Amino acid sequence: MVVLDYGSGNLRSAQRALQRAGAEVEVTEDVDAAVNADGLVVPGVGAFAACMQGLRAVGGDKIIDQRLAGGRPVLGICVGMQVLFELGVEHGERTEGCGQWPGTVARLHADVLPHMGWNTVRTPSGSALFAGIDEGTRFYFVHSYAVRDWQLVTNPPFQPPLVTWANHGEDFVAAVENGALVATQFHPEKSGDAGATVLRNWLRDIAG
């Protein structure tokens, strides 16, 4: 298991959480290790533009492409989820993302920002990531930007992603399950037992 080191924070907490969930984890920017690992975790904190700059500097966008082309699991966390979308808009600045999913990351319409603390989520039927987690369980969020009003067009025979939603002022995407590509806007590594269950579920799916 590799946590991709591209200059973003939160690397070691992600590593420790995965280790507690039973994984052997290396934090590295090495391309070969990142491409060939059983699973790749892309964490992220801070600004969308800065994360994309760091990701491209180590070839992270190409690593993600290469892994997904081979059906190899990738987990994005917080801004590591946001950069998987087409576009980020912050302070009027538009930054191209990895483009794995259509959609724009934009500032939430809410009275209080950042959205910081514990919040419930609405999970879709058939979710593997949230298996065994009770409705009403809270997860830990820290963000001011998110994907809102995400409209997906299904292209048969491909199945649409499973989308989990949360609300802070308005609905936003809290998690996505899309084959080998999975991501959470919340921080599973800071979400206590519920976050640990999410990580174990992801690791279980990798193990097959």
Image: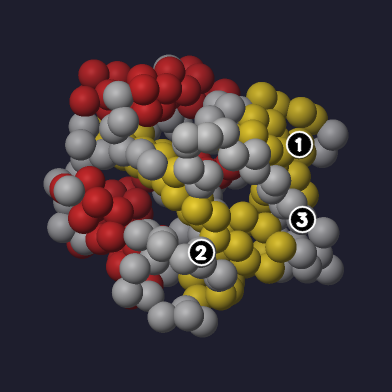
**How many badges with numbers are in the image?**
3
Question: How busy is the neighbourhood of tag 2: few (under 14 within 10 Å), some, or many (20 plus)?
Answer: some
Circle nearer the viewer, 2 or 3: 2
On the image, the x and y values in percent for residue 187 come to 46, 59
On the image, the x and y values in percent for residue 57 come to 48, 18
Residue 116, relative to residue 68: is it above or below? below
Q: Callout 1: helix, strand or loop?
A: strand
Q: Residue at x 69, y 48 (%)?
A: 150
Alpha-carbon span between mark 2 and mark 3: 22 Å
Q: Is residue 81 visible?
A: yes
The residue to which callout 3 is attached is 108
Alpha-carbon span between mark 1 and mark 2: 27 Å
Residue 21: image tag? none
Q: Quadrant of the N terminus?
A: top left
Q: Residue at x 28, y 49 (%)?
A: 15
The residue to which callout 2 is attached is 124
Q: Residue at x 41, y 62 (%)?
A: 126
Answer left or right for 76 relative to 69.
Answer: right
Q: Callout 2: helix, strand or loop?
A: loop
Question: How busy is the neighbourhood of tag 1: few (under 14 within 10 Å), some, or many (20 plus)?
Answer: some
Q: Nearer the N terminus, badge 1 or badge 2?
A: 1
On the image, the x and y values in percent for residue 147 come to 67, 48
Q: Callout 3: helix, strand or loop?
A: loop
Question: How busy is the neighbourhood of tag 3: few (under 14 within 10 Å), some, or many (20 plus)?
Answer: many
